[in-house]
Image (cartoon, coloured by chain):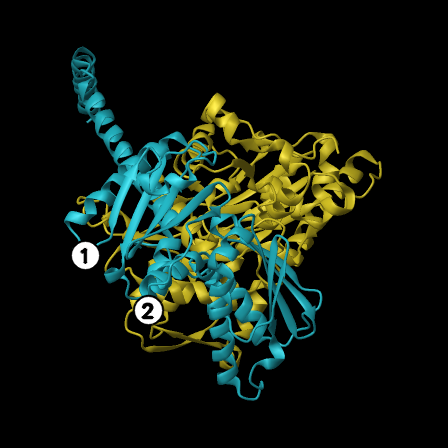
Chain colours: A yellow, B cyan
Amino acid sequence: MSSMPVVIFDNGSGYSKLGFAGNTDPNYIIPTAISSRESLGVPVSRLQCEDLDFFIGEDAYQNQKTHNLSFPIKEGQINNWDDMERFWERTIYSLMSVEPQEHVFMLTEPPMNPPENREQMAEIMFETFDVKGLYIGVQAVLALFGSNLYKEKQNLTGTVIDSGDGVTHIIPVAHGYVISSCIKHIPIAGKDITKYIAKALKDRREPIATEDLMDAARVIKEKNCYVCKDMDKELLRFNDKAEWKNYEGIGRTTGAQINAKVGPEMFLGPEVFFSPGKFTRDWDKPLDECLDSTIQGCPIDLRRDLYSNVVLSGGTTLFKNFHHRLQRSMQQRVNDRLARYAASSGNTPKPIECKINAYKTQRYAVWYGASMFAASPEFSRVVHTREEYLEHGPSIARRNVVFGSGV
Amino acid sequence: MMSIDPHHPLIIDNISALLNSTIDLTNLLFKLTDYDGIQYVISGQNTDSLCFTVLAPQLASVGEAGGYESIQLNYPGFPIAIDEGSYSILIDRSQLPDPSLGEERKLRANDIANKFSMFRTHFLSGPFIKALKNVKSGTAFQPKEVLIRPNEKLWVIPGENRVNFIFQVNFSDHTDGSLSRVFLQEFVEAKRQVPNSPVITFSQNPPEAMSMFKGATLPSTIGFLCITVLKEQIRQEAETGQWLAGLKQYLTYHLHACKTYLHMRMRKKTEGLLKVLKNAVPDKLEEKTFRRVRAAKTRREESKIVYNFN
């Protein structure tokens, strides 16, 4: 039964990407949400199987009238194991429709995930679902694996900007290993942009009910938002009402039609990455400055590679022109520094090329990388099998061998 | 969700998308898996036809026992090709209503997709339906041994106005095995609560009814589940067959759900115990008093200084 395909779960704080290895697209992209009867702890009665009365994904939103909606993953890390276990149970049985005993599973984890979490993941997968094998991959490395550059150069060195719904990370990777001392965490992500748009809509008194506001903002963020070249000029453009866009939707609970106008928040939302000081008090460094300082903190012989291979991953990097703007401001920054160096020392240094890669599979770059990896022949050598688990216990999951090193 | 949906959601998605589109199907190929170790390969034959191939180790055994008949009954009008170890059905897109009849075409395509998503259930319920039909009509038939899953067997044994289905229950995991024993005992007990339910017995040793197969080597198993269906109990053969075919999945699903539930309770319990432990740590009384005294002292001195300044 070794021909059974590997099942890949990439659970992010916003969306979960699920599918079989070897495909180019995940089979499902569903919100990582679960709605169950009980608010805290365990269901009371066992006679009626109350513990099975829960919904996941879109259905969780649909049933939030009668059930309590919760999100088991916060900032990329699993914080409610009960919910996560049930989420996996439902995805395995009703979405993927596979028998877990016959498949190898691949899960992903954020960088800096404590090893205890990894052990817990392995425990659930092996003890509850009796999976045949398990591999836990680091999201950043998988994203790099899925990028075109790996295919061309077979080199796993680069910087990954992973920006999802809950968290943004800048992660330098050298030869397949994450340089964990240099990871930068930015507390701005998709959710903040959604919140900002929701606030803008509310302030302008658009006719949207409070319970639909976040959904509407999310749809606007995914459909209309883009990154502009110059914020002030773009703002002037919106004085003309003809530039405004329409939003049409349906109220989740009422079922009524919603019609609203969408204005400058279309570019002001994503702008939070480039001029955060104007929008939030928590953070004032623009993304390009963070990226630059992250790479400057890395070992000197890696820096050129890190500059020339920046990979974007996650849904929040999908805004139109995001990579152009980032590339322009990065190149500017690097050139300025080189010019300063030239002026002070009199030497002309070799120019540094900054390259931000954007590609089709960016939204689920991690999943795509995982799919490529699981389908490659190296995978069978690194996966933890059931026999190993029974022999050594969950501690085997602490170490997940990095593939591709020394390639 | 008490039971697993017999439809395979991925097959519905893929086939309905392909049938509703007008793309060239020639180079298309993708694979899907299902319960019971069944794999599907959906491949394009030419621009307009799809080949739905099923691969499974138990294909021939189940097919001869009634699976093939069930498929022919459920998929009329689709050409079928049987090969060694594989079973293919051709779907012709050009047979669908014209694209100009948008809605009708869509309905028909979705209908086909829905039908194929039930393939496993239709196929595996074949032996059960055949036996049930025979009992109902009073036709005599030979006892059969069917390989229903890669490592599990089913024995269909006719009796007087009744049929015995004996399932071999196998779990690779020890915990699963022990839990399943408890579960299957509950099945036996169900007779008390559900009127007119079939007689179910569960035993570690092969039941009497299958004495004619004793000579055959039996692999080690958790036990044997025997479901006896009487002639009077047979009403809807197809539905009963579907339930019987999904028995193992139902069992596994509930075992896993049960383990999840137990884990939830364990976590809750640990949390409670940790709380008790935390409360048991004695307060550091002395240090507290010291701090309080010192704080009061400094405050007094500070106020003195302020007082002096004023």
Rounded to the nearest angstrom, the CA distance separating label 2 from label 1 is 44 Å
Q: Is residue A334 above or below residue B245?
A: above
Number of residues whose C-alpha sits closer than 10 Å to that of mark 1, classed few (under 14), some (14–19) or many (20 or more): few
Instruction: Residue A259: give x, y in percent of width and height.
Output: 39, 78
Identify the amino acid type marked 1.
Answer: Asn
Within-10-Å neighbours for mark 2: few <14, some 14–19, many 20+: some
Apparent side of residue A38 relative to residue A155 in the rendered image (left or right): left
Chain ID at mark 2: A
Total numbered labels placed on residues in the image? 2
Question: On the rendered structure, is B215 left or right of B197?
Answer: right
Viewer can see residue A402: no
* Residue drawn at 82 percent across, 38 percent down: A349
Name the residue beneath numbered marker 2: A252
Q: Quadrant of residue A248?
A: bottom left
In the image as oriented, which residue stretches furthest toward the bottom?
Answer: B100
Residue B165: % across, % down: 35, 49
Q: Measuring 55% from the left and 76% from the top, which residue is drawn there?
A: B77
